[in-house]
Image: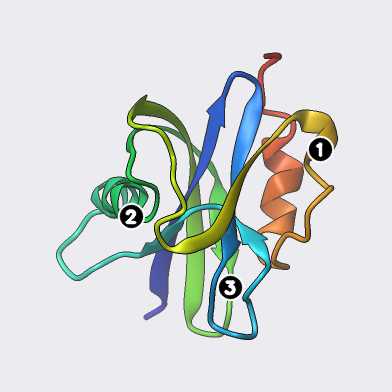
């Protein structure tokens, strides 16, 4: 059975939040959607809310799912949801940096290969600021 990774496409004021990986070395410096693995006994939504609290120090409201299961490394799939902030200000607790990207800045950073096709879908979902 594939392991599930959940991720949030957090959109605020017409901008998308991107997080720069600190590790492992093969992915360090690449940009991604914040999130992480689903723990045993945890729902996808519970994991997404927990991961955003741990990684960013924020509370989120989970919105619509984006696509289906996105392939990651062998044995892993990623599930992505639109999300909005409901409490806190994002800080990079587990990342090197965070960046809010306007639609015309989405490709100014080096997205991780697994996240890039999702960016292409999300760009059409970002409302005007």
Q: Which residue is mark 2?
A: 51
Cα gap from disc 1 to disc 3, whole angstroms = 24 Å
| Nearer-N-terminus badge (2/1) | 2
Mark 3 crowd level (few <14, some 14–19, many ≥20, 10 Å Cα): some
For residue 39, side relative to residue 119 (left or right): left
Q: Which residue is mark 3?
A: 72
Mark 1 crowd level (few <14, some 14–19, many ≥20, 10 Å Cα): few
Cα gap from disc 2 to disc 3, whole angstroms = 18 Å
Whether label 1 touches label 3, CB < 8 Å: no
Hey, which quadrant is residue 5 in on the image? bottom left
For the point 24% across and 49% down, which residue is it? Answer: 46
For residue 31, side relative to residue 85 (left or right): right
For the point 38% across and 55% down, which residue is it? Answer: 55
Cα gap from disc 2 to disc 1, whole angstroms = 25 Å
Between circles 2 and 3, the one closer to the viewer is 2
For the point 78% across and 30% down, which residue is it? Answer: 103
Residue 42, horizontal then vertical, whole percent: 19, 59
Residue 89, horizontal then vertical, whole percent: 40, 33
Q: How many marks?
A: 3
| Nearer-N-terminus badge (1/3) | 3
Q: Nearer the viewer, residue 63 or 68?
A: 63
Q: Which residue is mark 1?
A: 105
Colour convention: rainbow
Could you say whether the residue bearing mark 3 is in a helix, strand or loop? loop
Residue 15, horizontal then vertical, whole percent: 65, 28
Q: Nearer the viewer, residue 86 or 97?
A: 97
Could you say whether the residue bearing mark 2 is in a helix, strand or loop? helix
Mark 2 crowd level (few <14, some 14–19, many ≥20, 10 Å Cα): many
């Amino acid at each position: 059975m594939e392991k599930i990774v959940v991720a949030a496409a957090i959109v605020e004021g017409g901008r998308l939040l991107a997080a720069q990986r600190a590790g492992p070395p093969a992915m360090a410096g690449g940009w991604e959607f914040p999130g992480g693995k689903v723990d045993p006994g945890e729902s996808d939504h519970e994991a997404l809310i927990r991961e955003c609290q741990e990684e960013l120090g924020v509370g989120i409201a989970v919105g619509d799912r984006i696509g289906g299961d996105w392939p990651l490394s062998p044995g892993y799939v990623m599930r992505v949801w639109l999300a909005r902030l409901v409490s806190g200000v994002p800080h990079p607790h587990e990342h090197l940096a965070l960046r809010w990207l306007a639609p015309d800045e989405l490709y100014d950073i080096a997205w991780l290969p697994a996240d890039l096709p999702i960016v292409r879908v999300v760009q059409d979902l970002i409302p005007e600021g």
